[in-house]
Amino acid sequence: MTEPFVHPQAICESSTVGAGSRIWAFAHVLPGARVGTDVNICDGVFVENDVVVGDRVTVKGGVQLWDGIRLEDDVFVGPNVTFTNDRFPRSKKYPESFAQTRICQGASIGGGAVILPGITVGRGAMVGAGAVVTRDVPPHAIVTGNPARITGYDREASSPATPSPASDPSRSDEPIRLATDLRGSLAALEFTDLPFTPQRLFVVYGVPSKDVRGQHAHRECQQFLVCLAGSVTCLLDDGSHRTIKVLDSPGASLHIPAMTWGSQYHYSSDAVLAVLASHPYDDADYIRDYEAFLREKDDAQA
């Protein structure tokens, strides 16, 4: 790696800039900022003191990185993205500390997006151009609009990774039996056809379509999902592959093994989702942080 490059018309007051990084014309980096290796800071970027930029980050022109901004490795920030760090700004009045905004590894922020203070954009997420992000963005989610809502996930069913059947967390033999005649329809499930004996049943309904459910994994508990009415889209992530399945009839079902990260989104207004669980409720069985989930998967495979 070469020494960092600073354009003659840029101002770099920081002594903590990694090898191979490039700071282009009219950019200004204050003394307290920390910039990693092989970073590209384009024309007209301002970087305040309490800012950490990881390795291989790209920050396009017209971006200001204010105190409290954290960009992890491999993040892309598009042109004219607006970061904020004070929810109630007043001229000449400053908070005791600024909210910390974290853009996690491999995430991308499209041009012109607005990121409110204290937001976390999860690993590998994609924020669409012009989106206004008012809440945390889950890992690998694609969000667009104002306010930003989840419109999909990276590697959706249209272009998924190709896991083997044994490693595909969404694999299901569809054990629900359907019968339809002039009297109506019947969907039947024998518990003996499930990969576990259910210990608990709960039903999710009345979910606004803008909201996302799940966003956790279980250490031991397995789940079996059936959409009794309406439709819901399910994301499953085993740490190596991400797959998506739409449940849009009582005959469609989904088995979620233990140690699989799951989220449900795109609920229709009439969606009723039944969930059979292999274990009684135990808060200690939940993993609610995606990075912690990945660490536990790595430890189990070591």
Image: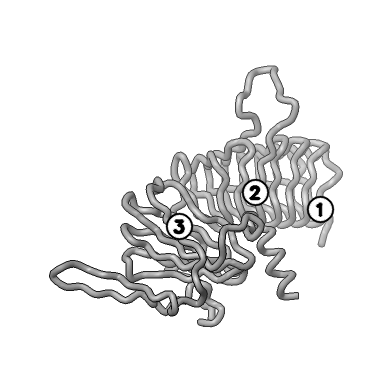
> Label for residue 202?
3
Q: How busy is the neighbourhood of tag 3: few (under 14 within 10 Å), some, or many (20 plus)?
A: few
Mark 2 or mark 3: whose residue is earlier in sequence = 2
Q: Identify the residue position indicated by label 2 in the image.
A: 103
Give the structural element (helix, strand or loop) at label 1: loop
Q: Is residue 26 visible?
A: no
Report how far apart the C-alphas of labels 1 and 3 lie in the structure: 51 Å
Q: How busy is the neighbourhood of tag 2: few (under 14 within 10 Å), some, or many (20 plus)?
A: many
Direction from residue 161 to residue 34 in the image, left or right: right
Indicate whether 194 appears above or below 277. Answer: below
Instruction: Quadrant for the C terminus, please.
Output: bottom right
Q: Identify the residue position indicated by label 1 in the image.
A: 18
Residue at the extreme left? 182
- The amino acid type, in three-letter code, at marker 3 is Phe
Residue 53, position as x, y percentages in the image: 73, 48
Q: Are marks 2 and 3 in contact (CB under 8 Å)?
A: no
Residue 33, position as x, y percentages in the image: 79, 41
- The amino acid type, in three-letter code, at marker 2 is Ile
Residue 2, position as x, y percentages in the image: 82, 59
Report how far apart the C-alphas of labels 2 and 1 lie in the structure: 19 Å
**Residue 191, quarter of the rendered image:** bottom left
- The amino acid type, in three-letter code, at marker 1 is Gly
Report how far apart the C-alphas of labels 2 and 3 lie in the structure: 34 Å
